Amino acid sequence: MKSRFKSSVVALAVALVAAAPSAVAQSKGAAYPVKPIRLIVSSGAGGGLDFVARQVAVPLGEILGETVVVDNRAGASGSIAAELAAHAAPDGYTLMFLSASLVVYGIVNKTGYDLYKDFDPVTQVAAAPYMLAVTPGLPVKNVKELIALAKSAPSKLNYASTGQASLANLATEFFASKTGVQLVHIPFKGVGAALPDMFSGRVQMAFLSMGSVYSHVRAGRLKGIAVASATRVKMAPNLPTMIESGVPGYVVTQWHGMLAPHGAPRAAIDRIQREIVKVVHRPEVASRLALDGTEGIASTPKEFGAFLRSERDQWAKVAKIANIRVK
């Protein structure tokens, strides 16, 4: 009896020792993931955010060895997706893909979630600079001439946006506050709705993401006069930045990032971020993103968290100056 008991104890001890490395590995996230990952995208299928999400999701799934399922949840500038993701289990198997528009929405609207408390940052995946585009018939060749024209005729120039309190709206009000010009806001239900009025000259200018307007600039239907990035962009190296054009500190990007529900395992967040670095630097991914005017970023969780707070602070100031109130 004693012999059998002793043998059982020894066998159990051996089993525990053998299992220990595996348990340690799992605690460090080495086994993650073991099932498909749900990526909730805060826009409908076919848009710029969805495009970037899908360019990233497929190769990310290949590297992880598990499918990354894109789940589009459009509405309220991404707020519907955010509320859904905020209440998901914080297990690393639900992530949210968002754009700058969601930060702006939360500044001027009441929401059922807190973007800064209910989520943990994973990474800023990519970004596309905004471009200042004007109708071809407008007699200006650069930003200085546009400012001079606007000051000579206050509230005579119209600008298009993708809706009241949208990023395009606040980006133009940011420009107005920095330059002292007075412009008339004409909101549209998206870029597609705004472009015909810009082509015809009924609306004279707009700040929109480069990916949505640059093809029209190349075709001569619009005139690009500056980009809102910190440095010139590869797609249009001859276009000066807004800073070079005499508007200091003017940087606006339509960025794309990834969050996890608050409390997600640190190992899962770190693994996703590490693999995103590899994904956005794949030549085929980088070239496809470049077609949309987008460049891979892959920041660390800490960097993305700081960036989110800086975006919130910047756009909150602009909304206050422009008297765009919380609804």
Image: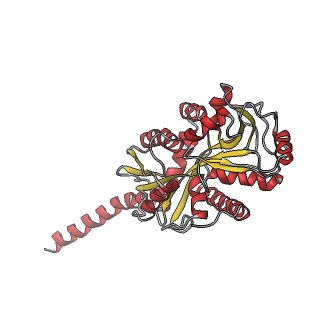
Q: Which residue lies furthest to the left in this view?
A: 1
Q: Which of 149 and 255 is in front in this view?
A: 149
Residue 286, horizontal then vertical, whole percent: 58, 34
Which image quarter holds the N terminus?
Answer: bottom left
User: Which residue occupies the foreground of this view, 307 or 99?
Assistant: 99
Q: Nearer the viewer, residue 220 or 45?
A: 220
| Residue 214 visible at all | yes
Residue at the top extreme of this rendering: 219
Q: Which residue shows up at 36% across the image and 49% down it?
A: 36
Instruction: Report the side of 244 relative to 64 (left or right).
Output: right
**298 displayed left or right of 11:** right
| Front-most of residues 13 and 59 | 59
Asked if residue 287 lies left or right of residue 311, the reply is: left
Residue 141 lies in what quarter of the image?
A: top right
Image height of 135 relative to 155, above or below: above
Q: Residue at (75%, 45%) from the top-left corner?
A: 157
Q: Name the spot of residue 261 as percent of width and height, x first.
A: 47, 62
Residue extending farthest to the bottom is: 2
Inspect this view and state whether residue 293 appears: no
Residue 19, quarter of picture = bottom left
**x, y (%) of residue 144?**
85, 41
Picture colour scheme: secondary structure
- Which of the image's four quarters has the C terminus? bottom right
Q: In this view, does 263 lie to the left or right of 280?
A: left
